[in-house]
Image: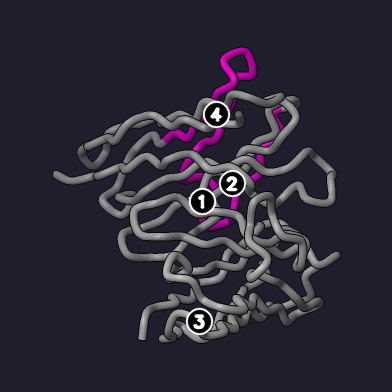
């Protein structure tokens, strides 16, 4: 069974750093894109970026380029989303989602999702 | 960046009604690389449709997708109580992949 299990909720202060994780199981982790999606309170879905674990190819939405870092550890079948200095406006639910194989016709569809990690940034 | 505009913002319907949701792209979406997702309160999104018209595994056939180029439609033929939710379209034909702002289908 394909599963994406995310790390637990976080409460942080502005300026602090943070890394959240997404562990994949039940499939060949290296062979599928993993995406990160933000959902601010009461708002819609925003595509942040993606990583292909096999070759670490990473792409960012212009809105998030330079604001976060996406990485992966194929040996632990885990993807990460990292902030070096959080802001109050980073308060949101963050989802990871599995895309398709690179260059496949469905590489960008997200067929499995993690349960979400709620990040709260407040002084 | 391709901007996806969904309409209407809210659709108020009754169980058994037909729902028609629209997603319009600011540029042509290549190879019909468009997906639809359903999100219920407190849950992660669920893939319904990909490739504009292919149902994902386990999705009932009352859900159908159509369209190409810049205009796409999600149709729910007869609304069941569990279908009242927010629906998002997403394009993956051009980076950055983007989502529409969502359509809420609520009970009239």
Magenta stretch containing residue B85, yes or no? no
Cβ–Cβ below 8 Å for labels 1 and 2? yes
Name the N-terminal-most of marks 2 and 4. 2
Towards the viewer: A82 or A84: A82
Q: CA distance from mark 4 to mark 1?
A: 17 Å
Residue at position x 54%, y 53% in the image: B46
Q: Crowdedness of circle 4 by 10 Å Cα count: few (<14), some, many (20+)?
A: many
Question: In the figure, residue A78 lies in which quadrant?
Answer: top right
Height in image: A113 above or below B65? above
Cβ–Cβ below 8 Å for labels 3 and 1? no
Q: CA distance from mark 1 to mark 2?
A: 8 Å
Tell me the residue that label 3 is attached to: B16
Q: Label 3 is found on which chain of the structure?
A: B
What's the mark number on residue A79? Answer: 4
Tell me the residue that label 1 is attached to: A64
What's the mark number on residue A49? Answer: 2
Residue B44 place in picture, x, y as percent: 45, 50
Left or right relative to A17: residue B21:
right
Q: Do dots 3 and 2 share one subunit?
A: no
Span of residues in magenta: A56-82
Magenta stretch containing residue A58, yes or no? yes
Left or right relative to A121: residue A2:
right
């Amino acid at each position: 069974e394909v599963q994406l299990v995310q790390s637990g909720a976080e409460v942080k202060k502005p300026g602090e750093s943070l890394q959240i994780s997404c562990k994949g199981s039940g499939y060949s982790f290296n062979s599928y894109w993993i995406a990160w999606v933000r959902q601010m309170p009461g708002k819609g879905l925003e595509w942040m970026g993606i990583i292909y674990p096999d070759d670490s190819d990473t792409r960012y939405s212009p809105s998030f380029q330079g604001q976060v870092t996406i990485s992966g550890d194929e040996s632990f079948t885990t993807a990460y989303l990292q902030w070096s200095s959080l802001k109050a406006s980073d308060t949101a639910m963050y989802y990871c989602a599995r895309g398709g194989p690179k260059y496949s016709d469905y590489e960008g569809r997200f067929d499995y999702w993690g349960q979400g990690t709620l990040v709260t940034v407040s002084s | 960046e391709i901007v996806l505009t969904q309409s209407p913002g809210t659709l108020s319907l009754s169980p058994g009604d037909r729902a028609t949701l629209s997603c319009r792209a600011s540029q042509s979406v290549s190879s019909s690389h468009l997906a639809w997702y359903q999100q219920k309160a407190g849950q992660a999104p669920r893939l319904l449709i990909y490739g504009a018209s292919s149902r994902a595994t386990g999705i009932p056939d009352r859900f159908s997708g159509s369209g190409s180029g810049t205009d796409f439609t999600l149709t729910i033929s007869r609304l069941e109580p569990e279908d009242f939710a927010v629906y998002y379209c997403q394009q993956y034909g051009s980076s950055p992949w983007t989502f529409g702002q969502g359509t809420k289908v609520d009970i009239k």
